Image: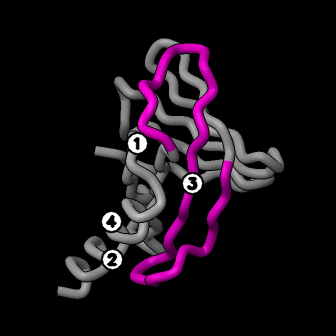
């Protein structure tokens, strides 16, 4: 029940901010599960080589408030979806043909996610 409430609250908070493409990814470990949500801030079609504004949020465990929120741009190339924050401190990579190979980088720390 707690999980269902968390998912509903996450989706409501994200959909209030944007209406474009959205990826929801779970950390690939058995401890300190995190959820990464990458949301487009416009309704424009995503085109290869064209930067689009996105917001990246990371939630720790069952927390209702994200531990990380950052704005930035996504660029696409073939099946690669690359996010870079405006301050260049956070990046994420989603391979649309291998969603279980998603990664988040913060400084020197890398975390793997599965966007199934």
Task: Report, in whole angstroms, how far the alpha carbon at label 1 lies from the one at label 4.
Answer: 13 Å
Residue at 60 percent across and 40 percent down: it is: 53
- Residue at which label 2 appears: 9
Q: Camera-side residue: 53 or 24?
A: 53
Q: Is residue 91 above or below residue 108?
A: above
CA distance for labels 3 and 4: 13 Å
Q: Residues within 10 Å of mark 2 (few under 14, many from 20)?
A: some
Determine which quarter of the picture holds residue 8: bottom left
- Percent across and percent down for residue 23 are 39, 46
Circle 4: is it few (<14), some (14-19), or many (20+) Cα within 10 Å? Answer: some
Q: Which residue is mark 4?
A: 11
- How far apart are the alpha carbons under marks 2 and 1? 18 Å
Q: Residue furthest bottom?
A: 2
For marks 2 and 3, the one nearer the N-term is 2
Q: Nearer the viewer, mark 1 or mark 3?
A: 1
Label 3 element class: strand
Return the residue at label 3.
Answer: 56
Magenta region: which residues? Answer: 42-71
Q: Mark 1: which secondary structure?
A: loop
x 57%, y 54%: residue: 56
Q: Separation of disc 2 and disc 3 at Cα?
A: 16 Å
Query: Tag on residue 111?
Result: none
Give the percent coordinates (x, y) of residue 68: 63, 68
**Residue at image coords 28%, 44%:** 116
Q: Are marks 3 and 4 in contact (CB under 8 Å)?
A: no
Q: Dot 3, crowdedness within 10 Å: few (<14), some or many (≥20)?
A: many
Report which residue position mark 1 lands on: 20
């Amino acid at each position: 029940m707690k999980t269902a409430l968390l998912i509903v609250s996450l989706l409501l908070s994200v959909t209030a901010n944007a209406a474009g493409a959205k990826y929801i990814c779970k950390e690939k470990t058995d401890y300190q599960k995190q959820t990464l949500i990458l949301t487009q801030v416009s309704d424009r079609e995503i085109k290869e080589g064209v930067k689009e504004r996105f917001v990246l949020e990371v939630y720790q465990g069952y927390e209702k408030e994200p531990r990380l929120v950052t704005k930035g741009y996504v660029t696409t190339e073939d099946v690669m979806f690359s996010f870079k924050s405006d301050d260049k401190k956070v990046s994420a990579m989603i391979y649309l043909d291998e969603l279980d190979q998603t990664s988040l980088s913060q400084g020197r720390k890398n975390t793997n996610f599965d966007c199934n």
